[in-house]
């Protein structure tokens, strides 16, 4: 089901995280009125009759209970809105707010954990620690919601080992889906000052592809779906990105790299590739290539191959 994203920039945010610049990322800082939200939904209704509506861009559960009710009540009255999801921060996940979400039939709660590392969270100005992040994720699951976890890569103080351990924590906490966001330096963010002073160095595009492909292997190898890789920045906002691995086709690059990694590691004799991804295997290294519904590598299906490689990525942490 397609999503109607409703951005409520900075709603409920009590501070500014060092990497955040909602204006630069979306071109909007004004919170839409109910009338505007209604117009957005009507606009989407022209192309489909079933949508999931998502409140993004701020900290939904940091709103007062009354305000949460107003938003949820308003949008669920639209015929095309069949499902609801919200995004929030770990330190604003409470039983009281989850009860409101459940009452209104919200199915998915996306928690902007960003990292499960104490130092990275501190250096990013998140204002909570790993214990709070884990507790929030577990609470969302215990209340029966689908749990989405947002992880940022390349934050200040982070490294490959930390990123992989964060992915493993997301698995342990019961994440159903994950978004991977390599950090971008946006001109309106505190991180931009750190970058211009030489205190922060973003990932290169190549590093981001390598790292994201390892994380995807670990996450999807353990059955956690990666639903987004890289930030969506509207074309007219691209110049707000001062540095960092911005690439609108980052997701494709990462998934292609995953297939390459499986191929390089397993060296299969026979490969099945869905026709739309046929171009990903430029050099099949002597293997016979067939077209089919799903990837397979000799006897191994795609998920089994991911699991095998995922175990090796994790084992490498100790070597
Ligand atoms: S990253 Fe999220 S919590 Fe932090 S300032 Fe931006 S919208 Fe608010």
Image (cartoon, helix red, strand yellow):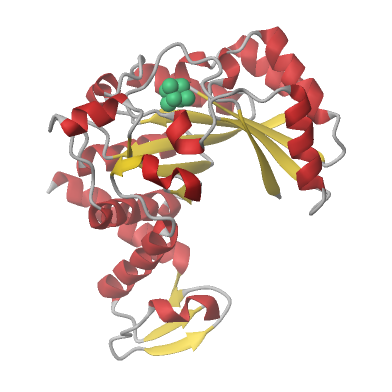
Q: Position of residue 6 (x, y in %)?
A: 65, 33
Residue 227 seen in this snapshot: no
Residue drawn at x 69%, y 49% as measured from the top left = 2
Judge whether 14 appears above or below 191 on screen. Answer: above
Q: Position of residue 92 (x, y in %)?
A: 51, 15
Q: Is residue 8 left or right of residue 45?
A: left
Residue drawn at x 47%, y 42% as measured from the top left = 178
Nearer to me, 16 or 314: 16
Residue 170 seen in this snapshot: yes
Judge whether 86 appears above or below 245 on screen. Answer: above
Q: Position of residue 118 (x, y in %)?
A: 26, 22
Q: Is residue 112 left or right of residue 54?
A: left
Nearer to me, 191 or 294: 191
Nearer to me, 82 or 200: 200
Instruction: Quadrant for residue 210, please give it.
Output: bottom left
Residue drawn at x 36%, y 64% as measured from the top left = 258
Q: How many marks?
A: 0
Ligand 1 image-quadrant field: top left
């Amino acid at each position: 089901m397609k999503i109607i994203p409703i951005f409520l920039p900075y709603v409920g945010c009590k501070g500014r995280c060092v990497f955040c610049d909602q204006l630069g990322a979306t071109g909007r800082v004004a919170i839409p009125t109910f009338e505007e939200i209604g117009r957005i939904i009507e606009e989407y209704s022209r192309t489909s009759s079933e949508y999931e509506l998502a409140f993004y861009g701020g900290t939904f559960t940091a709103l007062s209970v009354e305000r949460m009710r107003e938003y949820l009540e308003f949008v669920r009255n639209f015929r095309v809105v069949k499902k609801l999801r919200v995004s929030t921060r770990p330190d604003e996940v409470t039983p009281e707010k989850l009860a409101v979400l459940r009452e209104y039939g919200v199915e998915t709660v996306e928690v902007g954990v960003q990292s499960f590392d104490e130092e990275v969270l501190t250096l990013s100005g998140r204002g909570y620690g790993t214990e709070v992040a884990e507790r929030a994720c577990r609470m969302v699951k215990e209340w029966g919601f689908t749990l989405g976890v947002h992880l940022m890569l390349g934050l200040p103080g982070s490294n490959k080992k930390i990123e992989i351990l964060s992915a493993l924590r997301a698995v342990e906490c019961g994440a159903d889906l994950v978004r991977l966001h390599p950090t971008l330096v946006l001109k309106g963010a505190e991180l931009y000052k750190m970058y211009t002073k030489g205190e922060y160095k973003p990932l290169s595009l190549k590093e981001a592809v390598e790292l994201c492909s390892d994380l995807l292997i670990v996450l999807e190898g353990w059955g956690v779906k990666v639903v987004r890789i890289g930030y969506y920045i509207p074309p007219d906002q691209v110049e707000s990105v001062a540095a960092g691995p911005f690439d609108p086709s980052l997701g494709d690059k990462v998934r292609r790299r995953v297939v390459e990694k499986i191929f390089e590691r397993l060296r299969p004799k026979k490969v099945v590739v869905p026709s739309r991804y046929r171009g990903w295997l430029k050099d099949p290294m002597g293997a016979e290539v067939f077209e089919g519904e799903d990837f397979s590598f000799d006897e191994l299906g795609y998920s089994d191959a991911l699991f095998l490689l995922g175990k090796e990525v994790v084992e490498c942490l100790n070597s």
